[in-house]
Image (cartoon, helix red, strand yellow):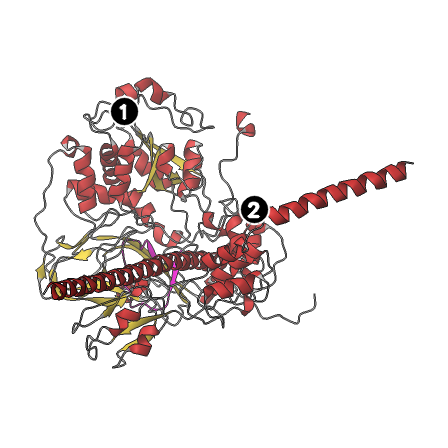
Amino acid sequence: MLSFFSKPRIRGGVHAEEHKAATAALPIASNFPLPEKLYIPLQQHVGKPAEPVIKVGEKVLKGQLLAYSQGMISAPVHAPSSGVILDVNDYPAPHPSALPIRMIVLETDGKDERIAAQIAADPFQLTPEEISLRVGAAGIVGLGGATFPTAVKLNMGRENHIDTLIINGAECEPYLSCDDRLMQERAAQIIDGVRLMLHGMTNSPGANLHLPEGGRAGQPGMTNSPGANLHLPEWGRAGQPGMKTTNAVIAIEDNKLQAFLAMQAAAKPYPLINVIQIPTRYPMGWDRQLIRYVTGREVPVGCRSSEIGVTIHNVGTAYAVHKAIRDGQPLLGRVITVAGGAVKRPMNIEVPFGTLISELFSFCEVNPEKTARIIMGGPMMGDSLPHTGLPTVKATSGILALTQSELKNTAEQPCIRCASCVSVCPAGLRPLDMANNIRINQLDAAVDLGLKDCISCGCCSYICPSNIPLVQYFKYAAGEVMARQQAQHKSEQTKRLIEARNARMERIAQQQREEELARIAAKAERERLKAEQEALA
Amino acid sequence: MYVLSAIVSLTLLGLFLGLLLGIAARYLKIESSPIIDQLESLLPGSQCGQCGFPGCRPAAEALAEGKAPATICPPGGSALAEQIAALLGLDLDLSEVKEPELLVARVSEATCTGCTRCFKVCPTDAIVGAPKQIHTVVADACIACEKCVDVCPTECLQMHPVEVTLRNWRWTKPALPVASNAVC
């Protein structure tokens, strides 16, 4: 009854055809032949690109550092296999434009020789700072697709008062099933990764940043969350070190029953880790939607989720953390879903980073004649790629080869103002009004309507009966707004430079005038003295 | 009677307010319109003359008087046009505005003699160098005024379009659908 009065916990969204059955039933294939050449981009994450530390011709071992992270938000890159560095140069990036970015080309020697790694006997004896240091050094980034460096997030978790860690196992994009398979097959490792993350986010005892025990239990949201079926953790009971300040919620869409059962069984010994089922609806895996559903709290516009006491990681990230801390293995590869109508053997497959998509496609027997579009990521938010000569990176959750019949009819028709896009928008925007303003170049009006809150989830384009490419309008406008801001910034800087130059020129001229005057005065003085001496003589 | 009192009071009120306005016009007079200063501060200030006026100040004056359209400044592009239109309260049709092609000066290192002429004329100090050393252009500070190109004795300074990289690549605007003749 009470839930009748509470706010709706899911806003907008669509339920697209899932197309997951073909790959979700098959185990993760690990028999992918090691490619002869790996093309490893230096920027596979949000932030600054990594800086290479190797030389061309150098021999490297598997897991060896190839490029170190520079700056606050960055991630290092490691060698996915052993071999020789062939080149460090610009190659086409896995991006709709396929413009070149810097990559390291590694020729593998087939030995797959590993570099010696430091492994802690009991990672829970390490300090939380040490955990996030190791996670950062392993090059781990958010594997859900955002590729934000995980160590930075763990640090934020220590600095803010986080009470809930959400592990995102929604995997709401159609076709993709890599997280589903990972949860089914490697549940224990994921749970271990979650425990390590919890430990990494704990404030170290010396810092004494804990909220008082009573105060934390009374936090709004956790207790008031409408109908959340997670029981309140017992704060006092946490016997294990490192699990004091937060509890974890693993959220899995209810179309992945096997994964849910596997995760629930693996999480049973740990009372602070809850595994819950959430409704199947795209975009359930959007962090704000998930936080809203799980905790009942809404992340305000322009804020990070850590500001309301929640942090969110992907299940793949948790697995990578486990590998990094327990095995000392940096992030070298990931599970990728290869699916779509043109794929003869669709599967989930574990590949090293830098593998060319063309090699993946030949392994999965993709029919190039039937392929109408290649997509990296899911069909809703993924990027369409121009060709297959591009490498897989940390963000690659799937590669789809879609046939013409799987694509939407793109013959665009006029907007009939049916407002379907308004009702499906999970961010609560009015896509039709925004697109109309952008069409006539009124970008400021579009920004006022909330352009910057658009997450490009694609629900509006999906539902539009007139096939209007709404998301492309928003992406175009966002880029244009950014370009104008940069242009304005440049013109301000130009003005500053011109003023500085004019001031300098003025100063130099002034100095010259003064010197000239001083010289004239000195000359006059000399002549006066001379005249006096002559007069005396 | 009511009519008369209304006429008299309104006339008196009008005269009184007119007097106040007259006094204000005399004693609170400002020398130049503040809108010109505001407009000038919006304009790039590089005095490039591409608008047809001898500098940014005369262009701002023309804008304030309504003699020039908001789209007057070619280097400013549509971003500046929008700002000017917002300041002056003009309706703006941006469909005719051509975005300026982004150019940047580049030194050909093979032919640079280190004569220092170019960096003496650069209005933004975007060229660094020393006598008999190869000069170079700081691309971020270059405003594409082409003054250096004119003074270079060996023609080693040339304008090049700004290279498209992943950093400045943008999504294109969707093309409008061709109007169909279908009758509904």
State yes or no: residue A443 in magenta. Answer: no
Q: Residue at x 18, y 72 (%)?
A: B134
Residue A412 against residue A202 in the figure, above or below = below
Q: Secondary structure at mark 1?
A: loop
Q: Secondary structure at mark 2?
A: helix
Q: What type is the residue that disc 2 sits on?
A: Ser
Q: Position of residue A308 (x, y in %)?
A: 38, 33
Q: Quarter of the image containing the C terminus of chain A?
A: bottom left
Residue A250 visible, this orientation = no
Q: Residue at x 27, y 19 (%)?
A: A236
Name the main secondary structure of what is drawn in magenta: loop
Q: Which residue is mark 2?
A: A423
The stretch in magenta equals A382-398
In-image side of B36 versus A288 (left or right) = right
Q: Position of residue A310 (x, y in %)?
A: 36, 34
Question: In front: A476, or A230?
Answer: A476
Q: Position of residue A307 (x, y in %)?
A: 37, 35
Q: Residue at x 33, y 29 (%)?
A: A163
Q: Earlier in the sequence, mark 2 or mark 1?
A: 1
Instruction: Give the Cα distance between marks 2 and 1.
Output: 42 Å
Q: What type is the residue that disc 1 sits on?
A: His
Q: Position of residue A168 (x, y in %)?
A: 35, 41
Which chain's residue wears label 1?
A
Question: In front: A400, or A226?
Answer: A226
State yes or no: residue A385 in magenta. Answer: yes
Residue B110 against residue A286 in the figure, above or below = below
| Label 2 Cα crowd, 10 Å radius (few <14 / some 14-19 / many 20+) | some
Residue A365 visible, this orientation = yes
Considering every residue shown, the one lying at the far bottom of the view is: B154
Question: In front: A511, or A293?
Answer: A511
Q: Which mark is residue A210?
A: 1
